[in-house]
Image: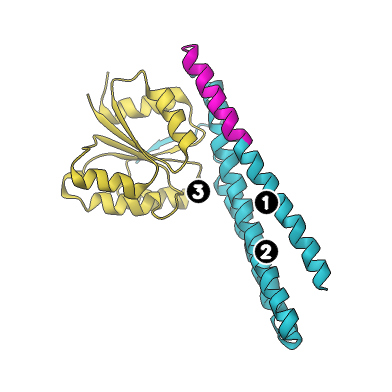
Chain colours: A cyan, B yellow
């Protein structure tokens, strides 16, 4: 069973590294766009503003997924430690660890919704609201 | 020239708002955290006429900032706009109850952002 967890952890680690790379690439793309706009005195119109802000949304989405991945990896680490020392405790705690995994996934899904903003509904007239 | 404070933990989000508001007759100050902004306000190094803050930020979120900000006697009536990806009605209600002036959903439209700033600051 330990090998199984090592494999899962390796995959999660790989996904985590790829996501961090994507974050860096999108940041670099933003900086290049920003320089191009400045060098050419371009006006930031609606389309350009959306493109510029996509990096922020991407970064937030990635951070939410990375939080979930880190939650899973912590759970696996604890599980492996129990497995090495106390098999009975593993049996007892399996429900608790499963719940921890489910909670991490639910939180990531919730953040996905919370961090999307108007990305999927830019035509809707709900952008600005005064109280 | 009115002073506008932008608070966002995203460097690129701040850069985007800066590019959009560069042509406006406002003095822009940007902070990567709400605590940094509060320190600047409390020390008197900046006195805002408007604050535009993100909601989801580490250490101190936009609501927590708003509560602290409203506790500063001179800042009780200074308008605060939330600029966030959050769209839930209950979150907007919470902001309203805390004394928020308005809510702008990201990604923002440049024309509407500038129009919101003009409206709040009563600029031309």
Q: Nearer the viewer, mark 3 or mark 1?
A: 1
Instruction: Read off the residue under disc 3.
Output: B88
The x, y position of residue A57, in whole percent, is 56, 39
Question: At x 66% / y 69%, what residue is drawn?
Answer: A75
Question: At x 59% / y 54%, what residue is drawn?
Answer: A110
Query: Which mark identifies residue A73?
Result: 2
The x, y position of residue B103, in whole percent, is 41, 40
Quadrant (top left, top right, bottom left, bottom right) of the N terminus of chain B = top left
The x, y position of residue A93, in whole percent, is 69, 81
Give the quarter of the image for residue A27: top right
Discs 1 and 2 share one subunit: yes
Tell whether B2 sits left or right of A54.
left
Quadrant (top left, top right, bottom left, bottom right) of the C terminus of chain B = top left
Magenta stretch: give its range.
A25-41
| Chain to which the residue tagged by mark 2 belongs | A
Residue nearest the viewer, comparing B65 with A17: A17
Give the quarter of the image for residue A123: top right
What secondary structure predominates along the stretch shown in magenta? helix
Instruction: Read off the residue under disc 1.
Output: A16
Q: Residue furthest bottom?
A: A88
Is B69 within the magenta?
no
Q: Earlier in the sequence, mark 1 or mark 2?
A: 1
Query: Which mark identifies residue A32?
Result: none
Q: Is residue B96 above or below residue A38?
A: below
Question: At x 76% / y 85%, what residue is drawn?
Answer: A87
| Chain to which the residue tagged by mark 3 belongs | B
Q: Nearer the viewer, mark 3 or mark 2?
A: 2
Q: Residue furthest top?
A: A40
Q: Secondary structure at mark 1?
A: helix
Discs 3 and 2 share one subunit: no
For the residues labelled 1 and 2, the Cα–Cα distance comes to 10 Å
């Amino acid at each position: 069973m330990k090998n199984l967890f090592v494999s899962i952890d390796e995959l999660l680690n790989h996904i985590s590294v790829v996501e961090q790379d994507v974050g860096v690439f999108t940041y670099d793309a933003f900086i290049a766009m920003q320089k191009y706009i400045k060098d050419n005195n371009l006006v930031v119109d609606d389309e350009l503003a959306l493109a510029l802000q996509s990096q922020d949304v991407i970064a937030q989405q990635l951070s939410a997924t990375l939080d979930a991945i880190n939650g899973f990896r912590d759970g696996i680490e604890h599980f492996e430690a129990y497995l090495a020392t106390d098999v009975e405790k593993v049996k007892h705690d399996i429900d608790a660890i499963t719940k921890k995994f489910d909670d991490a996934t639910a939180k990531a899904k919730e953040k996905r919704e919370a961090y999307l903003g108007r990305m999927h509904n830019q035509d809707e007239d709900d952008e600005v609201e005064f109280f | 020239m009115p002073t506008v404070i932008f608070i966002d933990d995203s460097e690129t989000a701040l850069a985007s708002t800066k590019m959009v508001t560069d042509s406006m007759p406002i003095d822009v100050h940007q902070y990567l955290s709400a605590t940094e902004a509060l320190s600047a306000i409390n020390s008197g190094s900046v006195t805002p006429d408007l604050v535009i803050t993100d909601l989801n930020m580490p250490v101190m979120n936009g609501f927590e900032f708003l509560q602290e900000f409203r506790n500063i006697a001179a800042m009780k009536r200074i308008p605060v706009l939330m600029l966030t990806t959050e769209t839930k009605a209950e979150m907007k209600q919470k902001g309203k109850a805390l004394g928020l002036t308005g809510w702008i959903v990201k990604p923002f439209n440049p024309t509407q952002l500038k129009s919101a700033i003009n409206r709040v600051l009563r600029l031309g």
